[in-house]
Structures are given as structure tokens and as C-alpha cells.
Image (spheres, rainbow, N blue to C red):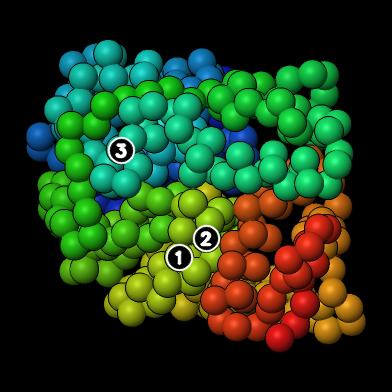
Amino acid sequence: MIQNKSDMQGQLLDIMDGLKVLKPSSPYWPQSANSYIFEDVEGLTLFDVGCGSISSVENLLWVIKRLAGDSVKITKIILSHAHPDHMGGIETLVPELKPESIIIHELDFPFALNPEKLQFSFDIPLCKKRLKEKGDIENHSDTPGNSGKKGASFDLLYYFNSVNCSMSSVKANSIVREGDNIQIGSYNFDVIHTPGHAPGHISLYERKKRFLLSGDILGDIVAWYSPSSGGVIGYLKSLEKIETLDLDFILPSHGDIISDPNKVIRKTRKELLKRDELILKSLKIRPKTFHELLKLFFDSPSVQFFPGTPILESHLQKLRIEGKIKSTNFQPKKFFLV
């Protein structure tokens, strides 16, 4: 492990030959995601670069220059998906590092290019619609002051700024899809499309070395999900893909190395399906409105707004498709068991 800079947040840890991870001080939002750093004879490759705050960017730059000096060559920056804790710092980093290629999945390319569009993959219009249906026009916030308020006038990019994990844009020059291959020195990764949390979320599988860079799909916390990002259906299908892989360990974007992949996959699936069970159990007592069901999951009005609303919507869509629930046609709409 490289000795920490005096004001450095987190730690730089060795994982295996030519692969290190820069871990933040906490796995929880709004801290940066883990940044994985590959070293080979051609230079450095980064898997995710973290938040756009000054401290986060300076932290990563200090580590890179400590590893490779001022003449550092960055061959690739790979983005697991276009969220601020994974790529917010890229606008500042690109002029400094001059990477040869910036790689992202084709479905997340437009969100990286124009972060304003993230409101649609986050389903913020749906959140505002459900709030209006409730008749509650107040703004709610778990943060002090007026910044980042969640409610009728909620602005996603302003919210990212308010919690010190700003987002930025980049035009990736390399697009990947399911089944593509990325070579990094002696590492050879298969690209696996793993939506649910983001439309173009990718995980990278090293078949010979038997490990996975999982992004947000697996880790210390179960990532939020929204219908426009693949929802709970997409999330569960992503877990099914990962479960078929021959794995010794998983390197997540949030948290420590996962040494028992199957255990964590089962635990994540159980957490997702538990929400289905809670909805069905509640509807067995009596039909309920969207907001009555929302309170089953989350106490805070701010969290109910987001990510609660898209999470619940994802489960209601799934249960409708499975023929387990229906809803009334009149307002306020209520959901009931079939």
C-alpha cells in the first residue's frame, strides 16, 4: 500500500499484479466510487474516476502522479456508467491526463455527453408526477439549507453539486456493447451489460483470472434502480448473468473485495425480492395507493421522492407483468391483488 498523502481521503491498496484500487473513506453516497488503476508497460488504465469535487479530483491526480510521475500516460479511462460518483471528475481530469480512449456502453454514451439527460434515466419526471398526484407541492430535503431540495422544483445536477459530488460531461471515443472485449496489459476483460441501476451499466469479467469488476450491481449496498434504467427486472437479469460466471472474487465500486460472490449475489437478490413480498403482503390486507405503498419502504419524504418512487414503480411494473397485481382506473388509483 502506498503511504497516504496527509490530506488524502481513503486509501490506495494493492489487489494483484498491476492492479490497485483507490478507495474512498466511505462506500456511501455522496462519496466517490472506487477507482481501479491498472499499470502496464503502456501506461495506466482507470476504471471509473469518482466525483467532480476539487478534493476528489486532486486526490486521484496525486495518486496517479505518485505511481507514474508527471509524464504519466493514460491509455484508457473506462466508465462503468454515467453517474457522478463514477465520472463526475472526468471533465477536469481529461485535459490533465489526456487519455487515448474513453470507453462507455452505447446506452450511457448520451448521458455522459449531456448529463441533463440523466433526469430521464433517474426517472425524475415520474417522481414529480407522483408527488403532484399526492397533492403535496412542498419541497423535501434531508440536507441543510435550500440546496438540493427534492420536490416539485427538484434539479438533479444542482443536487449533485449541493452534496459535493458534481457531474460533468465527456464525449467518449470508444463505445462498447455486450460481448465486446477490453485488453489492459495482461488482463483481458469481457464486457457484460448489467442494467438496472443505469441503462448502460457494464461489468467487466476476467475469465482466466476469475474475477469481476461489478460496478454498482454488487457491493456493500444494494444500488437503487429505476424503470428507465432497467428497473428491478433488469437488475435481477444482471444478477443471473453474473451468477453463471466462474468467479473467485468480485471487485465492487462501493466497498471491499467480495470473496464469496455467490453469497453476495443471493443476498442482493433476496433484498430485491423482499420488496415484492412486502407489497404483496400489504395488498393482501387491503388495496393501497402508490403513496401508501411507498411508506412501506421509506420513512423520509425526501427518500420517498427519490429513489423511493422509481424503486416502487419498478416493482409495481414487475408484479403487473407477472399478473400478480392490478390497479383501479379511477383516482386515487389503488393497487390490489389479482
**Residue closer to the observer: 149 or 84:** 149
Q: Residue at x 10, y 34 (%)?
A: 42
Res. 264 mark? none
Depicted 53 relative to depicted 233: above or below = above
**Residue closer to the observer: 136 or 1:** 136
Q: Residue at x 66, y 21 (%)?
A: 162
**Residue closer to the observer: 79 or 13:** 79
- Please identify the quarter of the rendering in which residue 251 is found: bottom left
Give the spatial CA distance, label 3 vs label 1: 19 Å
Q: Position of 326 compared to 84: left or right?
A: right
Q: Residue at x 84, y 68 (%)?
A: 288
Looking at the rendered structure, the secondary structure element under dot 3 is: helix
Check disc 3: other Cα within 10 Å, few if <14, some if 14-19, many if 20+.
Answer: many
Label 1 with label 2: CB-CB less than 8 Å: yes
Res. 231 mark? 2
Residue occupying the far right of the picture: 285
Check disc 1: other Cα within 10 Å, few if <14, some if 14-19, many if 20+.
Answer: many
Q: Which residue is mark 1?
A: 234
Give the spatial CA distance, label 1 vs label 2: 5 Å
Q: Position of residue 212 (x, y in %)?
A: 34, 62
Q: Position of residue 84 (x, y in %)?
A: 49, 33
Looking at the rendered structure, the secondary structure element under dot 1 is: helix
- Earlier in the chain: of badge 3 and badge 1, it is 3
Q: Which residue is mark 3?
A: 109
- The residue type indicated by label 2 comes to Gly
- Earlier in the chain: of badge 3 and badge 2, it is 3
